[in-house]
Image (cartoon, coloured by chain):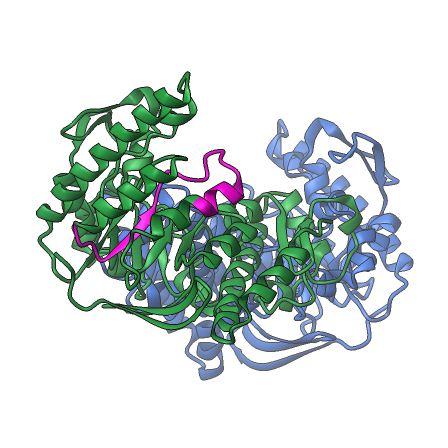
Chain colours: A green, B blue
Amino acid sequence: MRADGFAFAIDARDGAARAGRLATPHGVVPTPAFMPVATLGAVRGLEPATLAAIGAKILLANTYHLHERPGEEVVAALGGLHGFTGWRGPWLTDSGGYQVTSLGDRAVVGEDGVAFASTRDGAKRLLTPERAVAILEALGADVAMALDECRPTAWLGAATDAESQRRTEATLARTLRWAARCQAARRRKDRALFGIVQGGVFADLRRRSARDTAALAFDGYAHGGLGLGEAAAQRADLVAAAQECLPPAAPRYLMGIGRPADLLDAIEVGVDLFDCVLPTRNGRHGVLYTSEGMLRIRNARFRTDPAPVDPACDCPTCAAHGRAYLRHLLQENEILGMRLASIHNLRFYLRLLEDARTAIAAGSFAAFARDARRRLTGDS
Amino acid sequence: MRADGFAFAIDARDGAARAGRLATPHGVVPTPAFMPVATLGAVRGLEPATLAAIGAKILLANTYHLHERPGEEVVAALGGLHGFTGWRGPWLTDSGGYQVTSLGDRAVVGEDGVAFASTRDGAKRLLTPERAVAILEALGADVAMALDECRPTAWLGAATDAESQRRTEATLARTLRWAARCQAARRRKDRALFGIVQGGVFADLRRRSARDTAALAFDGYAHGGLGLGEAAAQRADLVAAAQECLPPAAPRYLMGIGRPADLLDAIEVGVDLFDCVLPTRNGRHGVLYTSEGMLRIRNARFRTDPAPVDPACDCPTCAAHGRAYLRHLLQENEILGMRLASIHNLRFYLRLLEDARTAIAAGSFAAFARDARRRLTGDS
């Protein structure tokens, strides 16, 4: 099944990189695109108007967290994520699989699904692929992710490479069976569902996972289970390997990655969508991105520095406030400081991808990426 | 000494209530006016643009807190509070006296000033009237308060009324000596200084304090040491008593008070300026003001309520979000919830005073206040 009201158009290619437009029932997302993370239906401290003002086009919410609090029935009663939160643009929800399996001892994965103890009331719950789709459709995001088995420890904790590969294959096979069940469980034709490619650090497994997932005809595809210790160069190779086996016309999403340079690497091999908590989390901790590298704003040398965080930045924080004030607010754990830093860092990410899109359209992505990487290595 | 660049014009009177304009070097403040509290140079979670958008005209910062962190020398190096924070409108700073004396055992009050241990580095510091004025002038607020001895326990903790009165007289007399020293210590003619009337719950002492403070020719006057347990009706009487002895053309400020009904009471007897942490603190705790009374948004009955906090409200929170979402955010201690609730509550206070001003100009303040009080007693 594929959803109605969705389309992915590729406007330009530059090597493997592509500039596209993902049309959804709630608006068009130019790609490559970065999705700010709104775990509980809110990017910490930033309301929809602020997010729109800095160029966000699509937000990501966490299914597991919203299922726990306030519950998908509450979100559904308010008209889904769009009505509940007031962000009327496109939403994407993750699968819940990663969060649930990362509960550790509090979750048990079986063929039917993931059994876990709710943090809301301690009650035992079973998250099956069918239940996951029902939750996702109640939340009503434009794009949802199929339930996957995401077991980072399957390959990191194994005694031998062979053992690690066997475990990864089992995870991948189960994810595929769950993906088929998710597809079969869909009731809403107005919401897209993406399949998730697994396969750990094994290129062959990633290719196989991509091929088999693509055979299920999802609306788009994601690379899962990465960013867990593999080298950046290896990750780009794994993503590229999987994409050989994905339909070229479908949108591709690299889940949870990462640093600005990681995004450039992935765009280079043809990834379209990204999310990561780094810009907001780093911002709250006073680590700020600039066109000349990272800036640790809590450093004492910014105590009386009147300059904006990045003189080349067009965000509202840089337009109105200097480093000394931002440093003071973050030193005092003043929530305005977290807000202003998040605004700045998100704008940095959003603009990086806007600029990448422009470079792809101009056929100059390689030079753009080289220059951006050189600047990003600066560190103050 | 009186400051240059200041003027207080009274546009309309309605009984003792007055509608005025306080001109400062950084803009004109229509009165009666409510000053949002920006303790450390920031209203929690709200940047200057947001504050301006909801009608704030003047902010209050805490001298003691800014002296401790980041230090007035930092603020001064950035161009004072205006340059440091980016709020380019008028600022008012409190005297620091209340905060210092509320340190309890960590502060010792003598004739020369208040000795206290800094929370910044544990070092002993002495806050004299002269030092207070130097700090205030370094912070650079348009209006500063003279250092006062604010001893709430002087009259609340006394064994007898006579003993309480003796202690209050001593406090009042010292405040007056400090006020004279503050006046003598002023160096900047471009910044206003207000004297503070003390006198506890004794109308005679408040009258005497007002008369003697007025004789020192400040730019304006404040009522201090109230809101500490006295009944609302008694407070209005005490304020009225003191104002008989203050120059009618000078602006009058009731420090740290209070609930919306308290503001109406004080406007009725001719007070022009107010500050209070209640709207922001209550907002962060989910207690929201509406035209029909208080609303405790964490109540379970708002779980799926799509209505804005107050359908009659014109704030950005009510324009974009419903009760269910605000409840969810505050339940989760999401800082966006604190921001949105603070925006709503501050707008409620600011609009209440805008409406009071309109009513005074129309000669209908008594009816306005009666109607507002009736609505405020609603509670959901």
**Residue B198: in magenta span:** no
A247 or B337: which is nearer to us? A247
Which residues make up the magenta segment?
A216-237
**Residue for point 45% across, 46% down:** A237
- Viewed as shown, does residue A105 lie left or right of B277? left
Quadrant position of residue B21: bottom right
Q: Split into 4 quadrants, where in the image is the N terminus of chain A?
A: bottom left
B325 or B166: which is nearer to us? B325
The answer to whether residue B61 is visible is: no
- Viewed as shown, does residue B30 lie left or right of A273? right
Provide residue A178's location: percent of width, then percent of height: 17, 38
Provide residue A262's location: percent of width, then percent of height: 52, 50
Quadrant position of residue A208: top left
- Viewed as shown, does residue B205 lie left or right of B177? left
Q: How many marks?
A: 0
Provide residue A306's location: percent of width, then percent of height: 76, 61
A146 or B69: which is nearer to us? A146
Provide residue A324's location: percent of width, then percent of height: 73, 54
Instruction: Say above or below: A38 vs A11.
Output: above
B153 or A311: which is nearer to us? A311
**Residue for point 69% across, 58% down:** A292
**Residue for point 44% across, 63% down:** A51
Instruction: Say above or below: B1 vs A270.
Output: below
**Residue A225: in magenta span:** yes
